[in-house]
Image (cartoon, grey):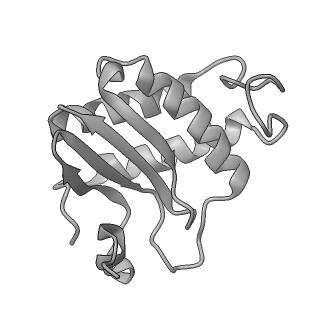
Amino acid sequence: MKKIASFTVDHDKILEGMYISRIDGDITTYDMRMRRPNMGDYIDNITLHSLEHMFATYVRNSQIGENVIYFGPMGCQTGFYLLVRDEKPERVLEITKKVLTQIIEHKGEIFGNTRTECGNYRNLNLECAQLESQRYLNVLNAKEVSFKYE
C-alpha cells in the first residue's frame, strides 16, 4: 500500500516552524509545527482544542478566509494543518502571524464555547491558547520561514 505523504517525511528531523506539506492542485497543506516530533514535549488537549477554536474562527474571518479549506490539530499533538486554496505562502504566513497576534490580544470568551456549539465545551481555556500562540509566533519570528522541511 502506498504511504501517505506525511509519513514519508523523517519526523525526527522536523523542527518547529511552518512548512508546505503537500500541494494538491490549487490547495496547499501547511504543516504548522509547534513542537518537535518525538521529543516528549506535546501540546495538551485543552490547548489544542482552545487554539483550534480561536485560530479557525479568526483565520476564516481574515483576508484569506474564503480560501481556507480546513484548520485542525495533528493527532500527534505537535501542531496543526492549515489547508488553503489559491494563496501565496508568504501571504498565508503573514495572515498566520496576524491571527496569532489576534489570539494573544483577544479579550472575552473563546469562540464556540457553549454546549450547542461544541461537543466538549468545558475543555477550553483562553490563556492556554494565548500562551501557545505567543510561543509559536516567537518561533515564526525567530527565523526566515522557507516552507521546506530541513
What residue is rendered at 42% in x and 29% in y? Answer: 99
Whole-percent x, y for residue 10 in the image: 32, 81
Q: Where is residue 9 in the image (x, y as percent from the top left)?
A: 29, 76
Q: Position of residue 77 (x, y in %)?
A: 57, 62
Figure quadrant of residue 44: bottom right
What is the quadrant of residue 88 in the picture? Answer: top left
Q: Residue furthest front?
A: 1
Quadrant in the picture for residue 54? top right
Q: On the rendered image, what quadrant is the N terminus found in?
A: bottom left
**Above or below for 137 versus 9:** above
Q: Give the side of residue 25 with respect to residue 37, left or right.
A: left
Q: Residue at x 23, y 41 (%)?
A: 27
Point 30% across, 78% down: residue? 2
Q: How many labels does the image show?
A: 0
In front: 141, or 82?
82
Residue 97 can be seen in this image: no
Identify whether 107 is placed above or below 50: above
Horizontal arrangement in the rendering, residue 30 relative to residue 55 (left or right):
left
Q: In this view, does 27 lie to the left or right of 109?
A: left
The residue at 33%/77% (across/down) is 3
State whether residue 123 is above or below residue 121: below
Viewer-nearest residue: 149 or 141: 149
Looking at the rendered image, the quarter that the C terminus falls into is: bottom left
Confirm whether residue 24 shows in the render: yes
Residue 38 screen position, x and y as percent: 51, 80
